[in-house]
Amino acid sequence: MARGFSPKVVRLNVRINEDIEEASLANISRSGLLALSNDISSNRHVTKLDFRHVCFGPEEGSILAKGLATNRVLLDLNLQHNNLSDVGTLAVAQALTEQGVLEALTLDANGIGDVGAYALAEYVSSSRTLKELRLFDNHILQDGGVAIGNAVAKCPTLRHLDLGLNEIGDQGAVAVATALCDYNKLSKLSIRANGITSVGGKALAKALRKDCKLRSLDLRVNRLRDDAVKHIFEALLLNSHLQELDLGRNSIRDDAMEFVAEVILKNKFITKLSFEDNYFTDEAAEVFLKLLQKAEHLSMTEFTIHSNYISEIKLQQIDLFMRTHARELQKKKRENKRQRSQSNVGVGHGHDTRDESKNSAGRQSSGSHSRSTSRISRGSREASKV
């Protein structure tokens, strides 16, 4: 890790060591950044740059972008917690479009609005390598969310998208859900804290019903109610991919129990489910516990229901069951792994036994052939004497 690009140590002739594959910094002057950008443009070794919390503004973003545009090896760029704003983001996005090989981009907390989101959407649409895009805690509104959602549908490599703590609303959620419906390979999606209501929830349920590839969905801190939960959990009865679902801090009440119940009993794929900080009561908690105990094929290892209107004793009962169940699942997993290992050893031993049998048979055949040859030879000598 290369550190220390501070105003005191950076010189115009600074070079990134060819042995270094990752570089980060804590502080840098403008002249140092110019030198660093020049190095990045021609460097063929550094694959990861970590520029978190370095006070980059729009000007610094534009300087860095000049070096990024001609770089052909960088795979991971982290610029979270700076102040690039739309101007700096536009420059970086255009540079990365030319760069063409980046796999992970983190731009959390950079004051990015819809203009920056449009620029990033154009980059994502054209990328054939990007796997991870993080835009948590920016100022992206509905139009920007729609642009990002439309871009997701055009990026075949994207696997992880974080749009949490923005304001993409239902329109943005619908756009992302539509991308998922097109058999997109996105596997992890966070759109927490985006003011999403039942409209967006139903759109996401439609994607889940089509058994999209999504494995983790974070809908925490939105405005989802029981009707959205109904559609989401009905979809989960047909979904075989989703493993983690976070519905914490929404507006879900006891009436949603009837939709959740069937999923707990029948779904074999959900491993983590959170209803933390909603409006469930002891009545719902009692039903939850009975369902969890009754489910024959329960794969769930985490079920979070704290910060509802549930008594401590009910929470302790559910927690105890889940901890015990998680240990049992882990034990079964180890046993299955051991049995598979023994089975593989047995198969290998079987091959060795058969090979040994063949070799033994070969030796016996060879011995028989030798004895036969010996008898024939003796017979020929006796015939010649006669």
Image (cartoon, rainbow, N blue to C red):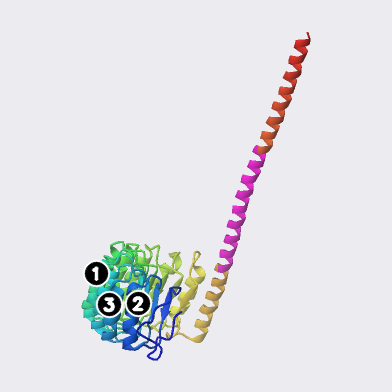
Q: CA distance from mark 2 to mark 1?
A: 35 Å
Question: x%, y% of residue 310?
Answer: 45, 85
Residue depicted at 40% across the width and 91% down the height: 8
- Of residues 262 and 107, the one drawn nearer to the viewer in this rendering: 107
Q: Secondary structure at mark 2?
A: helix
Q: Which amino acid, mark 3? A: Lys
**Which amino acid does the dot numbered 2 rest on?**
Asp
Circle 2 residue: 39
Q: Which mark is residue 150?
A: 1
Residue type highlighted by circle 1: Asn
Range of magenta residues: 330-358
Specify which label sits upstream in the sequence, 2 or 1. Answer: 2
Between 215 and 250, the residue placed more toward the observer is 215
Q: Residues within 10 Å of mark 3 (few under 14, many from 20)?
A: many
Instruction: Specify whether 84 is left or right of 17.
Output: left
Q: Is residue 288 left or right of residue 35?
A: right
Q: Which mark is residue 384?
A: none
The image quadrant of residue 69 is bottom left
Q: Position of residue 90 (x, y in %)?
A: 24, 78
Q: Residue at x 43, y 76 (%)?
A: 17
Residue drawn at the location 78% of the way across and 10% of the way down: 385
Split into 4 quadrants, where in the image is the C terminus? Answer: top right
Residue 100: x and y, percent? Answer: 30, 67
* Camera-nearest label, 1 or 3: 3
Nearest the eye: 302 or 68: 68
Majority secondary structure of magenta residues: helix
| 332 magenta-colored | yes
225 in relation to 270, above or below? below
- How many C-alpha atoms fall within 10 Å of the one at disc 2: few (<14), some, or many (≥20)? some
| Precedes in sequence: disc 1 or disc 3 | 3
Residue identifier under label 3: 66
